Every structure is written in structure tokens, then in C-alpha cells.
Image (cartoon, grey):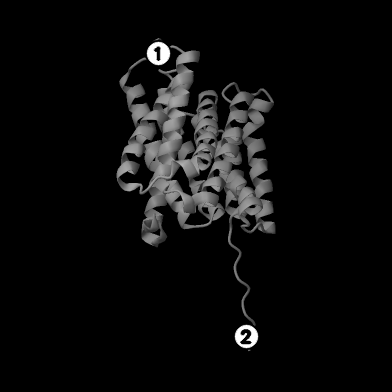
Amino acid sequence: MRLFGKRRFGVLGFVVLVIAWASSFSVVKVGLEDAPPVLFVGGRALLAGVLMTAIASVWGGDLNFRRDWRVFGFLAVFNVALFVGFQTFAILYLPSGTAAVLIYLQPILVGVFAWAILGESLTPTKVIGLLLGFAGIVAVSSAGLLGAAGDVTLVGVACGVASALSWALGTVGFKKYEARISTLWAVAIPFLAGGVAFTGLGFVLESPSEISWTVPMVSSILYSAFIGTGLAWLLFFGLVRAGEASRVASYIFMVPLAAVVIGALLLDESLGPPLLVGAALVVSGIYLANRTPRLAKKPSR
């Protein structure tokens, strides 16, 4: 994915990524109205995994599964099983914009894990950013914590934060082992494995008869599988491969705001003060936590 090393392609990649992920929150919210959550997750991940495996078989290069199965297993657990699973339940139990804000605490967590695991910098500015991010989570969660609004639940908030934590660990793990596996296979195998596991679990816990095969549901699962999952993860891993994990993660701070706006426009979700204040604090925290300090000016002679 050296293509993302060129600035104009990197900017285009980020724009497409933001649109794909931001729109997916509202799209998944629509799909969950006509399908049980576990089967929906399984179908979404399985479709994405099948498509990406076909693409990786042609353009993904050599696959050394015997050597790298532990890496693929790690990515499958954190980027698919935990991240997508918790994300789906967060969207189910929260307005899509609120879920987006919580899940996109991920860039702040990536900054911490990248410092601890990859040796990337952690400056005082980043620490301030972390505190602002935490304040944003408190603001977003305040309605549910005080029992003031039924739309925001503690279960949903917990799932959103757990999803962010899982995604952050999966992102740093990919960056650590990126030299061993191709970007295409890093998306294909984990989502194929996760899709099979979720689909099997869905048949145990839920019934296919609960699925209403409406046009919105089918469109939702196809869009979230191919655009919100396959294409988006390929872009994200390609961008992470091309730069520092924490710096790349910081740019997706635009996704929560875009998701909030899309949720308000498409689903008539509220843009109340707690959500707006929380979004502002989280976005500010992500920016500061990943801000590159300016170099001190050299004294003039």
C-alpha cells in the first residue's frame, strides 16, 4: 500500500474512509431494525471476508498462514469479534451519533498504546488531550448515568467504550506486525473467520426467521459489509502502514462529527447539549493527544 505514501492519495483515502465509516453508523442502525444483532454482524463480516479473500487471493501476495496464524488470530479477536460485536450492540442500544462518539475514543487509546507498545511519543499535550477525551465520555454518558434519557443506556455506553478499546489494541497490533503480512490478508482472514464464528453463534442464539428481508435491511448489510467494512478497513490499514499509528488514528476524529450529522439528517436523532458538548470535547482531545509539537525556532545570529 505504498500508494498512501503520496499525499494526494492519502488525503483522498482519508476522505473516503471518513464517509464510509460515518455513514455506516446510520446504515447499521437501519439494518438492525429488521435483523437480530448477532446474525447481522455475522452476515456483515462474512460477506466482507469472502469478498476480501477473493481479492487477496489475486493481489494479496504470498500467505504464510503457518507462520502468521497467531497474528491473524489476534486481529480476528480484537478487530472483528470484540470490536464489531461491541460496536453493533452500542449502535443497537444508543443513537448512532452517540455510539460514534464513544467508539471513536479509539484514537486517544491508540496514542497511549502506541506509546507503551510501539515507542511512539507521548507529550504533555497528549496527556491534556486524554483528559479532554475522558471529559467528553462523561458528558456523552451523563444522560444515561443520571437516568434523564431513555435513548442513552449504560449497556450501550459500556459496549461503545469496549469497542474502542478492542479496536485500539487491534490497530496497534497490526502496526507492530505489519511487515509480516499484507494489508489485504490482514483484512480478509480475520473478517472471514469472524464472520463464520458470528454466523454460527447467531444460528445458536437467534432464529433466521427473525430476519425481515426488506430492501432497507438487505441494502444495509451489503453497504456495511462492502463499504463500511471491506473498503474502509483496507483504507485504514493501508494508511496505518504508511505512517505512525497514533498520527493516522488522529485524523479520523472527523468520523464522529460526520456520523452525528448523518444520524440527525437520516434518522432524525437529537443534537442535544450533552452529545454536542461530548463530541466537542472528544474531538478536541483526539486532536491534542495526537498533535505534533512545533519545532522551536532557532535563535537568530
Q: Which residue is mark 2?
A: 300
Name which residue type carries label 1: Pro
Q: Quadrant of residue 167?
A: top right
The reply to whether residue 6 is in sight is yes
* Lower position in the chain sequence, tag 2 or tag 1: 1
Q: Looking at the image, which residue sits at the far bottom?
A: 301
- The residue positioned 60% from the left and 44% from the top of the image is 282
- The residue positioned 45% from the left and 15% from the top of the image is 203
Quadrant the N terminus occupies: bottom left
- The residue positioned 62% from the left and 85% from the top of the image is 300
The reply to whether residue 280 is in sight is no
Quadrant the C terminus occupies: bottom right
Q: Quadrant of residue 207?
A: top left
10 up-or-down from 150: above or below: below
Q: Which residue is mark 1?
A: 208
**Location of residue 238 in the rendering, given as x and y in whole percent from the top left corner:** 42, 51
Q: Looking at the image, which residue sits at the far front?
A: 66
Asked whether 128 or 120 is in front, the reply is 120
Asked whether 187 or 84 is in front, the reply is 187
**Location of residue 25 in the rendering, given as x and y in whole percent from the top left corner:** 45, 33
**Location of residue 88 in the rendering, given as x and y in whole percent from the top left corner:** 50, 28
Q: Secondary structure at mark 1?
A: helix
